[in-house]
Amino acid sequence: MNLSEPVTPHVVGQAVGKYRWTICALLFFATTVNYLDRQVLSLLAPDLSKEFGWTNTDYANIAAAFQFVYAISMLFAGRVVDKIGTKAAYVVAILIWSLGAILHAFSVPMGEGAAVLGAAFGVVLVPSIVGFMISRAVLAVGEAGNFPAAIKATAEYFPKKERSFATGIFNSGANVGAILAPITVPLIAAVWGWQSAFIIIGALGFLWMAVWLWLYEKPEQQKRLSKAELAYIRSDSVQPVETTEQASAAAAKKVSWFQLLKYRQTWAFAFGKFMTDGVWWFFLFWLPTYLSAQYGMKGDAIIVPLAVLYSMTMIGSIGGGWFPSYFMSRGYAPYDGRMKAMLVIAFFPLVVLLAQPLGAISFWVPVLLIGVGASAHQAWSANIFTTVSDMFPQKSVASVIGIGGMAGGIGGVALTKLGGWVFDYYKSVNDIRTGYMIMFGICALAYLVAWCVMKALVPRHKEITDL
């Protein structure tokens, strides 16, 4: 479809196409690959820690390297997505993160070279740690582009009333990736070695890239999209459909970070991400280690518990994306319905407080309780992302997502580093259970704190139209 063609207003009851859900499926598979690549290290961590002699703090440093670079990269990724467009940005992102994933297989030789360099300056650098930190950094640069690009694509292809549901669906790819990883990674590592796990999983991104290049165009240029569906997508836009000249002029007008930071809406999103992103990463990076440290579970033994836990999170992601529509159908505006839903969701992680007190019954008790908390995170995530497209114009969505992503990454670094220190200390005093109790307590309370601050900053919905 050409931008210069008139778009007929959508008529209620008129049949529209479903191509936007094809785009949602592409975003789902990209997120699946994203989390598959991210999970390989955490699943191999118990064995790699033994092979290379890592402490909990060493592993936390490797994980924190990913999170720190991811945080910084998110800020720039949003700008890149807004500047070069969704299609090109996704290609660049998945190319970098796939190469970064594969690079892990060659981390040890790289690390040895870095160690020699460190020794020349009188600095002790453990080869494997340096190599994996570099690989995680490259992976982070690429993976930072996934969510800004996906949220922008969702804003381009879905009306506001469907965005959180679409976000919940593609975001559930994280859960599928987390389920597939413990099934495939240990098997590949057992048959072909741990290096092959990084190479094979990393190569999946190149397959997705080919399909993306084939199927994705902006809605106004998408030949597979009907006029009726385009009108439906644009049905709740506060601005008229742009001509080619208007779109080019809007793209040329840059929105600076400083402009975005003057809005409370930006700070509300950033604080919500800062408080809660680290919780998901804590579960993602530390759960295999938790089951190994507290229950002696290794290798194949952790596959079923992790698969069950992450299967639960799919319900949270998709159900959480749908949940605001319950309030919207009762007359709430999209943002207000989303905040109501997020308040309800914020209470569910409190069950994680019971994981340690009831953990003596069976390892399934903390697995299921943490599963509820992780499900709540995915439900929360589907909605907090969509608050941005509720309030900001499309041209600045990815930039705001990037600012919030950086805040979330910093929060993740802080929580991961804190976890490493706490676990090493309580392991040294032979009381690792208390260490996990402290960390689970932080994870459980984070969402209510985040919601209260977000509501205080933006008590009522106000769409930004002056950018």
Image (cartoon, rainbow, N blue to C red):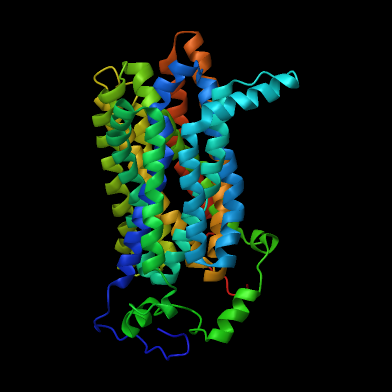
Residue 397, percent from left and from top: 53, 64
Residue 54, percent from left and from top: 51, 18
Residue 195 is drawn in which quadrant? top left
Residue 244, percent from left and from top: 54, 85
In this rendering, the answer to whether 300 lies above or below 448 is: above
Instruction: Name the residue: 32% across, 60% down.
Output: 25
Along the horizontal axis of the image, is 304 left or right of 97?
left
Judge by depth and name the residue closer to the eye, 50 or 196: 196
Instruction: Name the residue: 38% across, 33% down.
Output: 196
Is the N terminus in the top left, top right, bottom left or bottom right quadrant? bottom left
In this rendering, the answer to whether 78 lies above or below 271 is: below
Along the horizontal axis of the image, is 244 left or right of 222?
right
In this rendering, the answer to whether 345 lies above or below 62 is: below
Extreme-right residue of the structure: 121
Extreme-top residue of the structure: 429
Instruction: Name the residue: 55% across, 27% down.
Output: 109
